[in-house]
Amino acid sequence: MKRKFVKVMFFGALALSTVTYVGCKDYDDDIKNVQEQIDAINKKGADVTTEAMTAAINSAVAGLQTQLDAIASKADKTALDELKKTVTDLQAALNNKADATKLTELQTKLDEAIAKVNASIESSVGAAKTELQAKIDKLQADLEKADADAAEKIATELAAVKTELQGLINANGEKIADLYEKIKGLDAIKTKIEALEEADKNFVTISQLNDYMNSDAVKAYVDEALVDYLTSAEVTEQVNAVKTYVDGTFKAAIMAEIKAEYLSLEKYNADMEALMEKIDTYVGKEDAAYKKIFTDITALQTYQQQTIEVLVASLAENNTIENANKIVGALEDITTLQTEIAKCAKTTDLDAYVKGTELGGLIDTHLQDKFAGYDGEIADIKKRLLALEIDVDGLKSMVQSVTFVPSDSEGKVYFSSYYVVPEGETEKTLIASNNTVTVKFRVSPVSAAKNFFDNYTASFDAQEITTRAANIFEGEGKVENADEGIISFVISTTTEQSHAVCLNIIAKNSVPENAETAIKGTDYFTNINSNYFPVIVTTKTISGIQVESTNSTVSSIYYNKEASKIDYKAGVALKARFVDGGNATLDPENVDLSNLVTSYEFDKDMTNPDAPVILDGDGSYKLEDGVLSLKNYAAESAGKEATVVAYVAVKDGDNTLKEFKSTAYAKVTAANYTDGTVNLTPVAPTDVLYDGTKVTSTSAYALTELYTSAGSKDIYEAIPVDKFTPTADKGVTFVIGEKNALTINVPKGTAAGTYSPTLKIQVDAVKVINVSASVKVSYQDIKVVIDGNIVSAGAMTLKPTYQGSYEKPTSVGFTLDLATLYTNYATQLAAVKKVGGDITLTLKDAVKGASINGTTLTVDKTYNAHADDINPIVIVAKTVYGEATLDNSTVETKINLTEISGTWAFTIKSAAFGKDNLNSTLNIAKTASWTDYRGKVMWADGAEKAQGTTEWGAKPLSVYGFTAPVFSIATADADKAKYVNITTDGKISLTDAGKNLASAITLKVNVAAVSNWGTITDFASNNEVTVKIDLSQDAADI
């Protein structure tokens, strides 16, 4: 493969790890025409946890590190460090959206660094290549003369050595850079996962929402409008709702990144493969909109890779900086759109918090509005890329690597040939073989799989790595799974020797036929090998064949049950014994057994083959096509015996080469049928813990019990699955597994109780096994414990919460993180959530102004301690599983509010009007004051204190929800009100009538002040002023 293409693909890998995220923006102009339908994925139920993603990434990194270490150890350390630094600088440049000039400079440095590494590697691996080639030559020679057992070991070693040599040939600076960048890319994804886990752990109450949303781990994945919806009063579990939304958007983006990294791996990794299956299942269980989002994010990952590849090619040419900068701009737009699409990913898990509510409809409408048209936006990007001569289809069809996908942990492919020595001869004859085997390979990039056989010629190389000789192995290929990049071949061979084999692919054309455009200056011609794998060819000479049957041990046939028959073909299998020892079952799916003909006869005395047939009950039995039955189902058949034996004739056309007699089956005696029913009942209930998240499977009966009840292990395992009839108890039911092993499934969310599923097994025409079970489902004893340092005698006193600051408040209320009332809330909540339960926090009785959001209790200014129907604030914590409450889990805590009504002071007790001040206005509010909980004056001398700059962040009385005190004539003196004028703020004067009073009078002025929080200290006894009017003397003398 040309070096330029290797470098282009390295930059493609680099692109996969440089996705940066931008802030959310209005989607109306960016996203259009949502496509609601994509291909359905039928698998259901799996989840992709952060733990699963991290474990798979760690496995992939370990594999890449092993490859990197193997190559890097052969390079000069200084040259290697320079190469790694250049890769890191390129990473930073792409992250920081560097222009083409900067990227050109870095590309030149990359070329220089790669050249230095290549030179240092070549000087150190030349001798190693020669040594390995000599080892291959010797192993190849040893393989040609090895016996069957030695051949398998040698072929396995040969495949490993050839792969090692192939690795040395491919060891170069480009490969080091590629591996280093892949590791960095995977580590970067893992860092994002760990950061989200940490953010989730620290987001416990809704008061921590801002910190959560603004954290680096989360802010890239949230649409602020949607978070506003999820934190509205209509959502009762706001923290969990927000976390669930973020989890869905995060996974949409991260799963696409992981998938892109996975598909760039050249070597097969079982853990990553398993994670891909989980991702497919996870996406498959979501609705069409989510699937469409994931599909488009993945498509944009591919666009991004193609754009980077063209950018590299453009940088290699002269006078293309302007064009390259346009490509950089396109790359930024792809990244932005990719991020915005991910923010709209709403999983079905969110339905638990909003489904069926008006809010659920608003959220769906919001996302649809944001969605509208992004298909068109993607199409516009594709047009822009094509205008820049970026082929978003062509490079996807160009294979970078091809990797053997093993079918088992051994990673070997087996061919077996079976021989017999015909009667009267000495030379063996081939009678059966598994002459075809399916092998699978994964091509990278995965997009190349779809048109692989249009663009490439594939053959199998079973010779030395430096030559490609005649095709010892041949096969037809097909695309097995285009989405995963899997191709397969059904291969055959005529060789009797084991080999180390690889797949070689050669491009049919220098440019893929399905490419819309071709990148200028790129050589698309490909001629590459897969890794080597051992193909083990074994030859065995058969000395005997046993015809096994699930009914081989049946010893009774019932003369009073006409349905009683024995079919020796049931579960039939041919087990061969070999001349050199050992045995093996001949699998008809892998071995052509058409030359082996089985027949059944009554057993004969082989020491006297001319003697009459014996053990057939004196003619009482008949044997037709392997089925034994009585001729007469009546009492006279009682005690009649028969023995059946099978023969296997090895045929060559009409000619029988050899016949093998199997060991006779058990002697059968005709017996009286009484009752063939066996009842299995449980000794004790099976204990199962409640789980609201998944189906729980528990063991049922020991197989030995079932074998005994059926008659034998072989008989039981051969019972057809349609002969098992389970009867569920509220969903709790028996499940029949492999070889008829029994388990009991308890549906998720099954309430506590005892359940009694049953199962009827029809063993044969006369025998029935009735199985019953007792399953006891219990709730885990998970409950909160009161913190005695906070709560005493079932109550605690809550201090006020000052908005703004304590020193300069803007508002006052009461808030409490209810989780702090308990010593173990977080751990118990996590434990109960793990099994689908919950710990609920509610008010025992409704209290106006008091509400609970998640774990946050809020008491606002609408609270009124003086209301006739006021209830105490009592928090009820309890553990719930579905609709049920765990016994003894309910904990009540009374919340008393700290008295924050403040203190009233009023030193004036009386006021007087005389002849000397009858025209005056008296301020009877003078000396009256109302100070707050902190001792700060809110109101004094008839006026509210100014907001100021040091003590109050808002008008003082409004901070507490208070209104100013009101002065008025006492009700008892209402008839005297015509003599005075009084304002609500305490200013009083005489009316004309009052100024003409001929006699002295006295009246009372009352002050009204109320706190909704409780009682104002010293107010009740100090809220009245006596006003005296006597115009016959001076005021001072009154």
Image: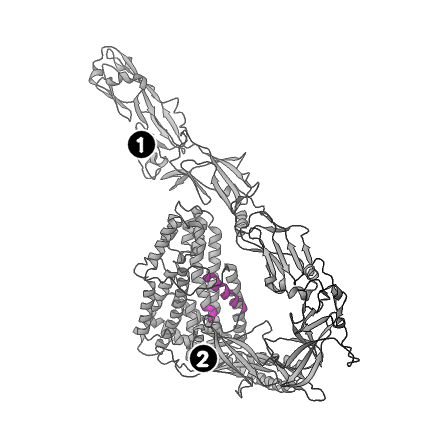
Predominant secondary structure in magenta?
Answer: helix
From the top left corner, tell me how far across and down residue 1037 is, in percent. 28, 12
Element class at badge 2 = helix
Residue 279 in the magenta stretch? The answer is yes
Q: Which residues are magenta?
A: 260-284
Would you name the residue on which mark 2 appears? 453
Can you tell which quarter of the image residue 545 is in? bottom right
Residue 489 in the magenta stretch? The answer is no
Q: Amino acid at mark 1?
A: Glu
User: Residue drawn at (25%, 11%), measured in percent from left and top?
Assistant: 1033
Rendered view: 948 above or below 461: above
- Picture quarter with the C terminus: top left
10 Å neighbourhood of mark 1: few (<14), some, or many (≥20)? some
Would you name the residue on which mark 1 appears? 944
Rendered view: 850 above or below 666: above
User: Residue drawn at (35%, 71%), measured in percent from left and top?
Assistant: 102
Q: Amino acid at mark 2?
A: Phe
From the top left corner, tell me how far across and down residue 952 is, in percent. 34, 38
Q: How many marks?
A: 2
Instruction: Check residue 887 in the rendering and tell me which mark sits there, or answer none.
Output: none
- Picture quarter with the N terminus: bottom left
Nearer to us of marks 2 and 1 is 2
Element class at badge 1 = strand
| Residue 495 shows up from this direction | yes
* Foreground residue among 156 and 995: 156
Report, in whole angstroms, how far the alpha carbon at label 2 lies from the one at label 1: 87 Å
* Foreground residue among 931 and 998: 998
